[in-house]
Amino acid sequence: MENTLFARIAAIVGSASLKKPILAVYNNATRHYVSVAADTTRGKVSGYDTSARCYFSGNSTTDLSFYDYGTHAQVMLRIADNKVHGYNYKTRSHFNGHISGQNLFIRDYKARQNYTYIF
């Protein structure tokens, strides 16, 4: 099964950017939709990843950080000027990216992987 943590991140970023709930994101690498719902419209992060069968949520009012119940990881997530910055405390890895329209480009530095999602 594909690790969909970055799909969850893309859904959160999409919800925050578009100011509406997201129901799925498109993974450019696999050319498939990932059924992951996210909502940030109430100032909190909440969502569910159908493919991984897990919830994720966060209560921060200053950023989009959340706890991912699928990977049991606390993830710090911030957006500023179409730039995304994050840190996965479980894997001790940084990731950065940028938003262009409805595209999210992410670089996972520890895994040396690039991800592209459309929300």
Image: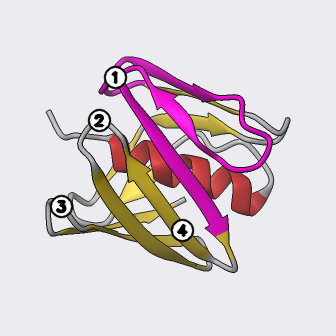
- For marks 2 and 1, give the CA distance: 8 Å
Measure the alpha-carbon separation of dots 3 and 1.
18 Å
Cα separation, mark 3 vs mark 4, equals 16 Å
The type of residue carrying mark 2 is: Lys
Q: Name the kind of residue labelled 1 in the image.
A: His
Mark 4 to mark 2 CA distance (whole Å):
19 Å
Mark 2 sits on what residue? 90
Residue pointed to by mark 1: 72
Secondary element type, mark 2: loop
Q: Taking 95 as reference, is 110 left or right?
A: left
**Residue 5 place in picture, x, y as percent:** 35, 42
Task: Residue at 46% x, 57% y: name it.
Answer: 86
SS class of the residue under badge 4? strand
Q: Residue at x 85, y 35 (%)?
A: 42
Spatial CA span between label 3 and label 2 = 12 Å
Image quadrant in which you'd find residue 47: top right
**Cα–Cα span, label 1 and label 4:** 21 Å
Residue at the spot 41% in from the left edge and 24% down from the top edge:
50
Identify the disc placed on residue 108. none
The region drawn magenta spans 50-79
Q: Which residue is mark 4?
A: 84
